[in-house]
Amino acid sequence: GAGVSQSPSNKVTEKGKDVELRCDPISGHTALYWYRQSLGQGLEFLIYFQGNSAPDKSGLPSDRFSAERTGGSVSTLTIQRTQQEDSAVYLCASSPRRLAGVNEQFFGPGTRLTVL
Amino acid sequence: QQQVKQSPQSLIVQKGGISIINCAYENTAFDYFPWYQQFPGKGPALLIAIRPDVSEKKEGRFTISFNKSAKQFSLHIMDSQPGDSATYFCAATSSGTGNQFYFGTGTSLTVIP
């Protein structure tokens, strides 16, 4: 079946502009994560959605970052007034319903954001 | 604060050699330790994972060694192949929360033919 998809694959924007990054999770997966991967850094957790529960936003670095998930499926990460330090690869991952313990995360290919 | 520390940052190994990547953690609540493999332009993919009730897990050429008392775990790639050249991330999470994975900074592995 189809994996996690993200769009666009690459985004170049000017400092101060807003950007929207999209994630289509695997059908039926109830959990969705956003991560940021900067050069030479690990994966930085941004936000987590689980079903209809309130999202865990504890990883969002500033109030310029926000995310929503419509209908429990597609998610959009929005970065307002982009800064050069926002340049990174933004990864989305989805996971099936958590019955007990840990469920594997399936990652998309990422969106490479470059802020000029 | 980095919850999971990974080393080395980069590694070059001859074909047929053994690649070893190390990770250390502090949070004793962590009880699931996956390793991810990432090729350029792709997202990370789960390679192998271990729980702390065993000291070793082997899948093909890939082995995780786990030392609970030292709070360390490592990935061993036996008979390394050029196709193994990728970035490897260790991670840790607690099944009690299960929603947040803490990743190491990654190791770029190059296997020379």
Image (cartoon, coloured by chain):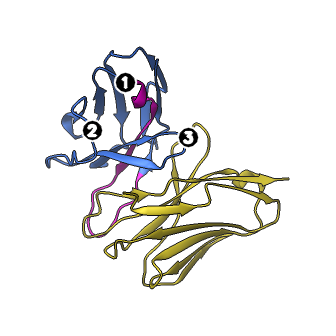
Chain colours: A blue, B yellow
In percent of width and height, residue B45 lies at: 52, 52
Q: Which chain does the residue under circle 1 lie in?
A: A
Q: Position of residue B49 (x, y in %)?
A: 49, 68
Residue displayed at 23% across by 48% down: A58
Nearer to the camera, B91 or B105: B105
Residue labelled with disc 2: A73
* Residue B91 visible here: no
- Give the chain of mark 2: A
Query: From the viewer's perspective, is the residue at label 3 or at label 2 nearer?
Result: 3
Residue A26 at least partly seen: yes
Type of the residue with mark 2: Ser
Which SS class for mark 3? loop
Q: CA distance from mark 3 to mark 2?
A: 22 Å
Q: Which mark is residue A83?
A: 1
Q: Residue at x 39, y 47 (%)?
A: A44
Q: Residues within 10 Å of mark 3 (few under 14, many from 20)?
A: some
